[in-house]
Amino acid sequence: MSLRTKLLKWLVIPLVTVNLGAAAVAYWLAWIPAQSAMDQSLADTAWALVPHVQEKGTSVELSLTQQAEQVLRVDHFDEVYFVVRDSHGKTIAGDLDFPELMIPEKFNLYSAYGTRMRGEDVRAISLRTVVGGETILIGVAETRIKRQQIRLRILLSLIALEFLLILLIPAVIWLVLDKGFLPLREIHDDLAQRNPDDLSPLPLTMAPDEIAPFIRGMNDLLKRAQDSARTKQDFLANVAHQLRTPLAGFKAQLEWLQSHYRHDSETAYSVSLMMASTERMARQANQLLALARSEPGDFERRRLEKISLDQLVAESVQQFVDEALKKNIDIGFDLHPTIVAGDRFLLRDLIDNLVDNAIRYSPEGSAVTVSCMVIGDQGVLKVEDEGPGIPASETDRVFSRFYRLDQSQPGSGLGLAIVRDIAKDHHAQIQVGPGAGGKGTEFVVRFPPAV
């Protein structure tokens, strides 16, 4: 379950419960004044009868015309009843079947209560007063139709309001949580848009107090990861560098053995196998060193300089020609003055890996072409071969570390990964596609203008 869902559950259930309790209180707060107002209306009717109760001789009677009585009993919803009684409970006027009156504790104050009359629930009030020295009890009652309608209207209004609030509460909480989680989304977007090698700290600017410790923890973790990556990178570079010297000496001794025992077929064959293994080890050591040098954390500490790309290629021409001759490959160079901003050692590694990859995967008797030129304001390096080509579905994967398209070919699967990292360091773009006539593969590296 997501944190948002948990918070929504923890907030909605208590809020809805409290809201329902508040609705019950609101219902009674609305109904009690309405009930009191209608009771007061009945009391006003009772007070309206008081002036018509008059003393006549030794008795008391109600002097009320039939028309006045009809006006008194008129109501559009309910039946209205009344009675006037003396202190002994004798009915002076009104409805003879009026139920027993509740005697108020004080004079001239009314009591409201519920009772039954003629088989129906009614609301009644009783009033005790004095007329001509005699204690008089007046009762007025009405049926509950109007009260029930008002009560139902209050109840339905509150139910509709509660239903609306139950729908609105989760929506409002969701929007509030969405806004509250905005700093976390910004952190997620920052991390998602980063280069995989970017371990720089997250910004703390305007971070809420609750999020700031989390960001500091992330920054500490990123710093430790950065330090660990740099340590591994330095270790890799040191190991690769340390391996190169003994391998070079071992290769020199093997070359001496090859020249002195070339007439001994068994020895020559054994030495040739050792020479091939040594060359593979030397190449892998060189690639590990190049990989360590191409890491962005190391590269950022270097200064870019203007480099003649065509001269870098020319410096390695003989090495490429020697490798091509071993497979009877026709390697050609089309070099035009091309200036780019970069690191000399890294660019040489990029060129070596692209050309070596082309020679390695090209069949015997084929051709490899290396060219560099300026197109627009960009420096461009092209390496084209006549090998088996790269399927469109694999053009991205070939730049992954340790991925090899042809497992039968010797290699570590690091060459194109090194090319990708170096190109990324120089903000260059790599394009992979078929060569001329749809045969082989063409790698195109486009460098930004040298400033």
Image: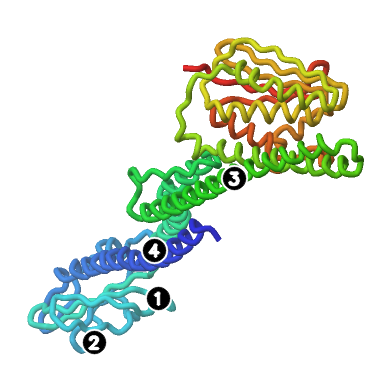
Q: Nearer the viewer, mark 4 or mark 3?
A: 3
Structural crowding at the residue carrying mark 3, measured as other residues with C-alpha within 10 Å and reported as few (<14), some (14–19) or many (≥20): few
Check disc 3 and report its element: helix, strand or loop. Answer: helix
Task: Look at the numbered disc 2 and give the secondary structure of its residue.
Answer: loop
Q: Which residue is mark 3?
A: 242
**Can residue 66 be seen by looking at this rendering?**
no
Q: Which residue is mark 2?
A: 89
Which tag is nearer the camera, tag 1 or tag 4?
4
Q: Nearer the viewer, residue 246 or 335?
A: 246
The tag earlier along the polypeptide, 4 or 3, is: 4
Disc 1 element: strand
Q: Position of residue 392 (x, y in %)?
A: 77, 30
Task: From the image, tell me which residue sits under label 4.
Answer: 19
At x 52% / y 46%, what residue is drawn? 234
Disc 4 residue type?
Answer: Asn
Marks 4/3: CA–CA distance: 75 Å
- 170 or 80, nearer to the observer: 170
Q: Is residue 381 above or below residue 263?
A: above
